[in-house]
Image (cartoon, rainbow, N blue to C red):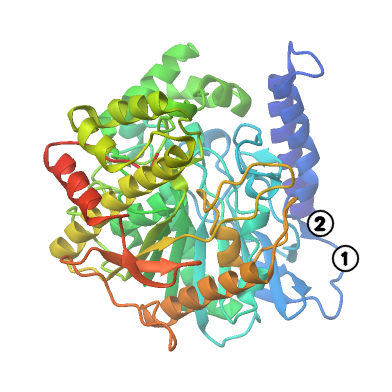
């Protein structure tokens, strides 16, 4: 056991030291990339390691497929943190399918969360304070998951596997808003997972496609998720969960991943329900494998790499810097974030673009999906009548006059109201079209919603309402974080969302005894109202506006979340 511990620690220190030396060479002490590397060194203390000391008598212990782990108690909940579900994808395993975890001897310490997958440093912006951002050190050695359970027993509770958001390039399972202890306290098993991000998780390249043996590349992050689900199926029964009662859930990029997994052959049978929070029908078309390979070729040319072997020699910091994409425009001409490294429609890992509701699905499982009321304004809004008109004309072209007639904008108050409504109507119209196509083509049980409870503004900051990601802390019960004032109403809304989620996990329908929720009908324009407006409600703000958006789509127009 001592030899195993020594080899593990030495391997990790050597890999991180190599990354630090390459990253720091030729840079000043205060350069952000060097600070980033220093954070990696500091993160060694967060690594999951083997422990030589005997665990305390009351320490929770469980034997998994690959060895024994020691967790930590938190009230009535037991947590096993930083548990590996695949080998570290470093060196020769960079841009390869995730490999099974090697067995270990002795007791592995699972009391601290792992490093996040490699990404650029987080930055505060808009409504996003620290609790919404990754705060963990980063590393390519990141394929770990966290488990919160009422007990490491065999009671067979429903299981939630949560996939974090972040545009497929940022975020982590360790973020404060994803802590699963409070939700697990409601009698379910909660698991959050890391997966490779950005250039490390989603770079395709013709040479990688040839190397793979199955004619594809670039979907490594999705393959990580599938590996994590296979780990769950093999191990969760010993952690108090039912492997045949698994719900996958995610928000933003995590929601996109949920929809990807529904059309992924290798994921079939690994989950029984799905929750896509912000959402489905986002208007982001999945790129082809050929297009994704083109991005990989461009990156290789940019760094002067003549082969994948050359790219594998680069430090993670060098690759991250080379793949940097500027943030999206804000204000009156706000645009969708450009995401170059994301899942691709390769016909192997993913069978078709799930962004189209008509795409055939592989896993016909119940789906709960929807959006928050103020998603579309997080990057800024127009402030004057002229700016509002320019905003609408840039988005809707020949249809602009029809939209301008429906959304008053002659005063500041009217603009503030109309920009929220036209932004919300845009993505809710797309959700309606997507859900109708999905139900008609596959018969999938879909439960769409619109959530409208505003998140408390940060002290001294602007109010952003029910912004993108605002529902997630309520879903997990993680209120009271950050410089914000929460009230009893927030607690009530959190309980409400958890009630719907747990009902869905248990029965495949989010209906509760006190709140019926019928599955979506293609002939309907209603969704479920969550938050402050409870019960069935129109998806859009008026029938006339819905008709206009429908006509715009029929004329070939495109709608999107942002």
Q: Is residue 168 left or right of residue 493?
A: left
Q: Secondary structure at mark 1?
A: loop
Residue at the far left: name it: 555
Residue beneath disc 1: 53
Q: Is residue 252 left or right of residue 58?
A: left
Structural crowding at the residue carrying mark 1, measured as other residues with C-alpha within 10 Å and reported as few (<14), some (14–19) or many (≥20): few
Q: Secondary structure at mark 2?
A: helix
Residue at the far front: name it: 411
Q: Looking at the picture, does residue 500 appear above or below residue 161?
A: below
Residue 5 appears at what percent x and percent y? 77, 53
User: Which one is in front, 30 or 556?
Assistant: 556
User: Which one is in front, 247 or 305?
Assistant: 247
Name the residue: 34% across, 78% down: 517
User: Which one is in front, 146 or 502?
Assistant: 502
Residue 533 appears at what percent x and percent y? 45, 68
Residue beneath disc 2: 2
């Amino acid at each position: 056991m001592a030899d195993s511990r020594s080899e593990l620690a030495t391997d990790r220190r050597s890999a991180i030291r190599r990354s630090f030396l390459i990253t720091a060479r030729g840079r000043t002490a205060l350069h952000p990339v060097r600070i980033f590397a220093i954070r990696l060194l500091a993160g060694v203390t967060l690594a999951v390691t083997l422990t030589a000391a005997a665990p305390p008598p009351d320490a929770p212990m469980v034997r998994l497929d690959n060895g024994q782990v020691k967790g930590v108690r938190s009230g009535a909940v037991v947590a096993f943190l930083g548990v590996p579900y695949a080998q570290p994808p470093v060196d020769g395993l960079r841009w390869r399918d995730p490999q099974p975890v090697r067995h270990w001897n002795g007791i592995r310490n699972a009391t601290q969360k792992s490093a996040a997958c490699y990404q650029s440093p987080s930055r505060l912006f808009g409504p996003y304070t620290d609790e919404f951002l990754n705060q963990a050190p980063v590393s390519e050695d990141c394929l770990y998951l966290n488990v919160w359970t009422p007990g490491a027993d065999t009671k067979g509770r429903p299981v939630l596997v949560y996939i974090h958001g972040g545009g497929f390039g940022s975020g982590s399972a360790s973020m404060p808003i994803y802590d699963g202890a409070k939700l697990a306290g409601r009698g379910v098993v909660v698991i959050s997972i890391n997966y490779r991000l950005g250039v490390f998780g989603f770079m395709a390249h013709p040479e990688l496609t040839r190397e793979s043996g199955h004619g594809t590349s670039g979907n490594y992050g999705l393959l990580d998720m599938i590996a994590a689900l296979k780990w769950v199926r093999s191990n969760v029964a010993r952690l108090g969960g039912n492997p045949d009662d698994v719900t996958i859930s995610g928000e933003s990029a995590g929601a996109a991943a949920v929809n990807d997994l529904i059309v992924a052959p290798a994921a079939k049978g690994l989950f029984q329900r799905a929750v896509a929070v912000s959402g489905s029908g986002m208007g982001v078309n999945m790129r082809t494998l050929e297009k994704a390979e083109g991005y990989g070729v461009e990156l290789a040319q940019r760094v002067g790499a003549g082969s994948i072997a050359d790219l594998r020699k680069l430090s993670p910091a060098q690759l991250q810097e080379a793949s940097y994409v500027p943030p999206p425009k804000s204000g009156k001409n706000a645009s969708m974030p450009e995401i170059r490294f994301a899942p691709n429609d390769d016909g192997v890992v993913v069978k078709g673009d799930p962004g189209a509701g008509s795409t055939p699905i592989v896993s016909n499982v119940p789906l709960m999906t929807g959006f928050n009321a103020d998603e579309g304004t997080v990057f800024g809004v127009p402030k004057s009548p002229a700016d509002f008109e320019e905003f609408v004309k840039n988005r809707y072209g020949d249809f602009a006059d029809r939209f301008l007639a429906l959304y008053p904008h002659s005063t500041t108050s009217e603009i503030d109201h109309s920009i929220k409504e036209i932004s919300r109507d845009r993505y809710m119209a797309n959700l309606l079209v997507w859900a109708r196509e999905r139900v008609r083509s596959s018969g999938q049980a879909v439960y769409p919603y619109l959530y409208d409870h505003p998140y408390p503004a940060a002290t001294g900051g602007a109010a952003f309402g029910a912004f993108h990601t605002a529902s997630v802390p309520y879903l997990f019960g993680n209120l009271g974080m950050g410089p914000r004032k929460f009230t009893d109403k927030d607690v009530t809304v959190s309980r409400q969302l958890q009630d719907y989620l747990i009902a869905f996990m248990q029965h495949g329908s989010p209906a509760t005894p006190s709140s019926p929720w019928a599955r979506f009908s293609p002939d309907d324009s209603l969704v479920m109202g969550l938050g402050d407006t409870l019960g069935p409600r129109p998806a859009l703000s008026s029938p006339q506006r819905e008709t206009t958006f429908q006509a715009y789509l029929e004329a070939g127009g495109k709608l999107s979340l942002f």
